[in-house]
């Protein structure tokens, strides 16, 4: 199969095999009319049917975004700008966020599925959040956003472990230096396991998992996608699927 034909199949056939996109078939007549009109107007371009790539659902009134990932990245970036650590370690968060943060602070990015990328300011390390490749009390600045809720559910090829999130919490506390900061986000609300996608936690459960640390601030994205910079833990306890952002520190007494 030629590259051109393979791309045509990818662009036209595969999207409509996804049940979530069946409704977009109703938008095909508009696409066809606009394709014909564009080709009629194009005098200096070759516009072939086999090269078309229908993007039928992008015509929206507002730019769509995922509130959890949008706000948690902004939340962490602003805290790192204020703290200005000499080195920051991130465990398993968004690779796009890591690429941007590494422009402002030297960043070591640890992932169970190691990132194969080369970028100034970014060092990619293979490792698990339940067995981080660092010695005790060695990290000043550490983050893990939307990660520990997945640990132990097998989604990314990791071993099944009902204690996965708790084990990750113990490991973060082990490697954090006294006086160091941990920036963590997880789904918050009605506590449950949505196997094998993720867990949802009551905020109080997270503070208990991280009992060796002191909670400095709690921020929140609620079920409506609104960001609250300083929120109460109780305000998130009865959400369905919010995003809780926890800023912890380790006291000198917990070295």
Image (spheres, rainbow, N blue to C red):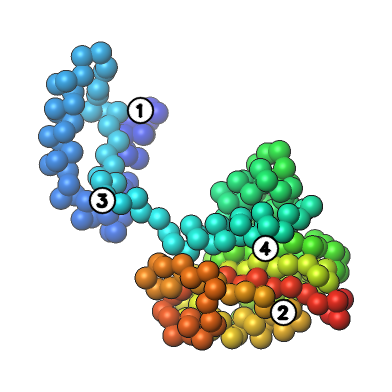
| Residue 212 image point, x, y percent | 76, 81
Q: Residue at x 57, y 61 (%)?
A: 75
User: Between residues 102 and 234, which one lies in front from this camera angle?
Assistant: 234
- Viewer-nearest of labels 1 and 2? 2
Q: What's the distance in space between the residues labelled 2 and 3, CA to CA?
A: 43 Å
Point out residue 247 in the picture as x, y percentages from the top left corner: 65, 71
Inspect this view and state whether residue 152 appears.
Answer: no
In the structure shown, which secondary structural element does the residue marked by tag 2 occupy?
strand
Q: Earlier in the sequence, mark 2 or mark 4?
A: 4
- The residue that label 2 is drawn on is 214
Structural crowding at the residue carrying mark 2, measured as other residues with C-alpha within 10 Å and reported as few (<14), some (14–19) or many (≥20): some
Number of the label disc, if any, that sits on residue 4:
1
- Foreground of the two, 17 or 236: 236
Q: Earlier in the sequence, mark 1 or mark 2?
A: 1
Residue that mark 4 sits on: 143
Check if mark 1's residue and mark 2's residue have beta carbons within 8 Å. Answer: no
Residue 50 screen position, x and y as percent: 27, 28
Identify the residue shown where x is 47% and y is 77%: 194
Marks 1 and 2, how far apart in space?
57 Å
- Can you see residue 204? yes
């Amino acid at each position: 199969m030629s590259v051109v034909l393979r791309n045509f199949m990818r662009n036209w056939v595969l999207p409509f095999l996804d049940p979530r996109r069946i409704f977009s078939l109703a938008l095909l007549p508009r696409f066809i009319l606009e394709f014909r009109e564009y080709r009629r107007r194009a005098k200096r371009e070759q516009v072939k049917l086999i090269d078309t790539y229908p993007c039928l659902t992008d015509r929206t009134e507002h730019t769509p975004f995922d509130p959890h990932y949008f706000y948690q990245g902004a939340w962490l970036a602003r805290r790192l700008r204020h703290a200005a650590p000499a080195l920051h370690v991130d465990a398993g968060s968004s690779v796009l966020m890591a690429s941007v943060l590494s422009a402002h602070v030297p960043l070591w990015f640890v992932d169970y599925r190691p990132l194969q990328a080369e970028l100034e300011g970014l060092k990619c390390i293979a490792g698990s959040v339940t067995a981080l490749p660092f010695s005790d009390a060695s990290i000043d600045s550490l983050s893990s956003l939307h990660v520990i809720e997945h640990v132990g559910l097998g989604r990314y090829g990791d071993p099944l472990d009902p204690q996965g999130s708790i084990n990750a919490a113990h490991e973060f506390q082990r490697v954090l230096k006294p006086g160091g900061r941990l920036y963590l986000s997880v789904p918050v609300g009605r506590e449950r396991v949505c196997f094998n996608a993720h867990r949802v936690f009551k905020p109080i459960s997270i503070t208990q998992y991280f009992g060796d640390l002191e909670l400095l601030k709690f921020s929140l994205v609620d079920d409506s996608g609104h960001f609250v910079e300083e929120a109460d833990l109780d305000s998130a306890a009865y959400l369905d699927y919010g995003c809780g952002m926890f800023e912890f520190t380790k006291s000198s007494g917990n070295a």
